[in-house]
Amino acid sequence: MNPNLLILSNIIEECIMMTKRLFLFLLVICGEYVMGQEPTEFLSGTVENESTGFPMESVHVLNLNKVEGVTTDNKGKFEIIAQVNDTLYFSYLGYKSLKIAVTQDMIKFGNSKFKINQLAFALEEIILRPYQLTGYLDIDVKNVPINTSGRYRIAGLSSAGYEGGNRNPNAISKTFASLFNPTDFLNNLFGNKAVQMRKLKKMRENDALKNLLASKFDREILTQLINIERIDLDEILRSCNYSDVFIKESNDLQILEAISGCYEEYRVLQL
């Protein structure tokens, strides 16, 4: 046989063997990856009013583990991604929130029924004090309440600004001291809450959940995701130099953005 043909034949055979080995290697890697993935499962159910038994429309159902959310349809039905031991959180204005751990039977049989109770509110007398407007702009603008919290922006950081309390000369010093000394409260909190902070980031990417938070002011979903008490949530915001006015009047979406922004800058300052 021609020596050149023999050499070429050997090269081709070696290439074929290498291709087979590479194919087997990729097959094993892909198999391990697929085996390592948790199967996607869905849980279906119906939300009802416990007092009347009627189905409830537009109830928000949130999987706290997967950070996935849906709302019930006009028959109270919903379907959501869930696995065994995930926690579902049901929320509806004027009703007591409900937390349920997902079981194997819920996923296997489907069409589980969840009942929520209406809250009873004791309304107190409210006295409205309208602004005394004269119709003259120069006079009326003086009667408009002013937020006295000073805001400061630091070049190099992404935030639009920090609230440093009232507009006294020491406010800016307090802001800088808190920012560049994150080893106390924020370090203890954020250093142990990386998983929860990633959940907040995922929630910011979900338009449906963002719309939900924009309509809420009770902080319930946020405290459940971060796994902290409401009082600690307020303390986080104060440590991030947000005023009491902002903490009191902002909706849950604004609070989410504030905490997320504070965490991102905390990470920058730790580098």
Image (cartoon, helix red, strand yellow):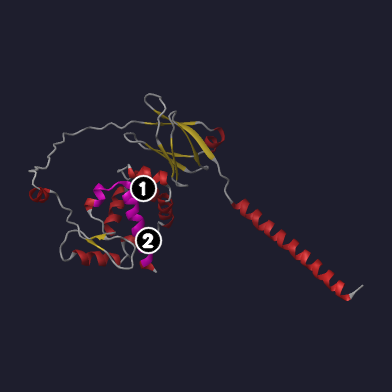
Q: Relative to the observer, which residue lies in front, 8 or 179?
A: 8
Q: Residues within 10 Å of mark 2 (few under 14, many from 20)?
A: some
Which residue is drawn at the image coordinates 17% and 66% (left, top)?
170
In the rendered image, residue 47, in percent from the top left (x then y), is placed at: 43, 31
Name the side, left or right, on which 17 lies relative to 149. Answer: right
Residue at the far right in the pictured view: 1
Q: Which region of the structure is painted magenta?
A: 246-268
Residue at far bottom of view: 3
CA–CA distance between discs 2 and 1?
17 Å
Task: Give the vertical position of 78 relative to 157 (above or below).
Answer: above
- Estimate how packed mark 1 is, as few (under 14), some (14 to 19) or many (20 or more) residues with alpha carbons within 10 Å: many
Sequence-wise, which precedes: disc 2 or disc 1?
1
For disc 1, the marked residue is 222
Left or right of 75: which side holds 173? left
Asked which secondary structure carries label 1, the reply is helix
Q: Amino acid at mark 1?
A: Leu
Q: Quadrant of residue 1?
A: bottom right
Tag 2: amino acid: Glu
Q: Is residue 85 magenta?
A: no
Q: What quarter of the picture does the C terminus occupy?
A: bottom left
Up the image or down, 254 lies above or below 271; here it is: above
Considering every residue shown, the one lying at the far front of the view is 136
What number is the disc on residue 264? 2
Picture coordinates of residue 135, whole percent (x, y): 9, 44
The residue sitting at 28% across, 52% down in the picture is: 234
Helix, strand or loop: magenta stretch: helix
Picture coordinates of residue 71, whole percent (x, y): 43, 37
Badge 2 marks a residue whose secondary structure is helix
> Does 38 sit left or right of 169 as displayed?
right
Residue 143 horizontal/vertical position (percent): 10, 48
